[in-house]
Image (cartoon, coloured by chain):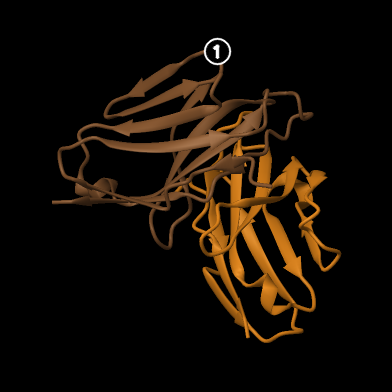
Chain colours: A brown, B orange
Amino acid sequence: DQQVKQNSPSLSVQEGRISILNCDYTNSMFDYFLWYKKYPAEGPTFLISISSIKDKNEDGRFTVFLNKSAKHLSLHIVPSQPGDSAVYFCAATPSVGSQGGSEKLVFGKGTKLTVNP
Amino acid sequence: DTGVSQNPRHKITKRGQNVTFRCDPISEHNRLYWYRQTLGQGPEFLTYFQNEAQLEKSRLLSDRFSAERPKGSFSTLEIQRTEQGDSAMYLCASSLADVKLFFGSGTQLSVL
């Protein structure tokens, strides 16, 4: 069963506009969430994270929002740039330390973002 | 370069052959992970080391797969008697006692 779901396989936006990528999760034990960006032929690169004690975390053009009651998070990119074109993965993990230290991440299937000039 | 290094980048093999991949983590990182990614899917956890101890293995890791991390530094992932279903990107990641994983560029395995 897919514990982390990214229901939009792809998203296309115009340069300068907002990109909103969505992620839903089913496991109520998850309480730390991360977004990774992946370019072709490269490994995923950490982008931004959020703990369940917060509902928003911002880093430059990137903001992640968490709605714990809805088990939903979203990544906002404003303004979008052509260099943001990549596959974005949402990942989640249970409480840090609850797994005996492994903190393994559960990933969604990814959303391919294309930012058109 | 102080990132996670994986070798080889690409491996083509025939079904039934054994293959071995190497991962060199970021030097001060004590945790090392192996993930597998197939087309259209996100990375899936395979196994995890803290220093030299292999502390967790996924049920995805059949007995044909073995991973080692001697001396708590680099790690190897070996697949014996490869099958076509083993074709995937094998990703290594490392971390320093937190959830922020740093990934290598991966080894793309093609089993013919």
Residue A32 higher or lower than A13, as above or below: above
Outermost residue on the right side: it is: B63
Which element is circle 1 on?
Answer: loop
Residue A103 appears at what percent x and percent y?
Answer: 68, 33
What residue lies at 70% left-to-right and 70% top-to-bottom? Answer: B20
**Left-right relation of B89 to A96:** left
Residue A62 higher or lower than B18, as above or below: above
Residue B89: quarter of image:
bottom right
Residue B107 higher or lower than B56, as above or below: below
Residue B62: quarter of image:
bottom right
**Left-right relation of A80 to A104:** left
Of residues A109 and B17, the one drawn nearer to the viewer in this rendering: A109
Q: Amino acid at mark 1?
A: Ile
Name the residue tied to disc 1: A53
What residue lies at 53% left-to-right and 64% top-to-bottom? Answer: B39
Which quarter of the image is occupied by the C terminus of chain B?
bottom right
**Quick check: can you spot residue B96?**
no
Of residues A35 and A108, the one drawn nearer to the viewer in this rendering: A108
**Left-right relation of A17 to A54:** left
Of residues B95 and A32, the one drawn nearer to the viewer in this rendering: A32
Of all chains, the one bearing label 1 is A
Residue A106 appears at what percent x and percent y?
Answer: 63, 41
**Quick check: can you spot residue B60?**
yes
Residue A17 appears at what percent x and percent y?
Answer: 18, 37
Of residues A14 and B55, the one drawn nearer to the viewer in this rendering: A14
What residue lies at 65% left-to-right and 66% top-to-bottom? Answer: B21
The residue carrying pointer 1 sits among few (fewer than 14), some (14 to 19) or many (20 or more) residues within 10 Å by Cα, namely few
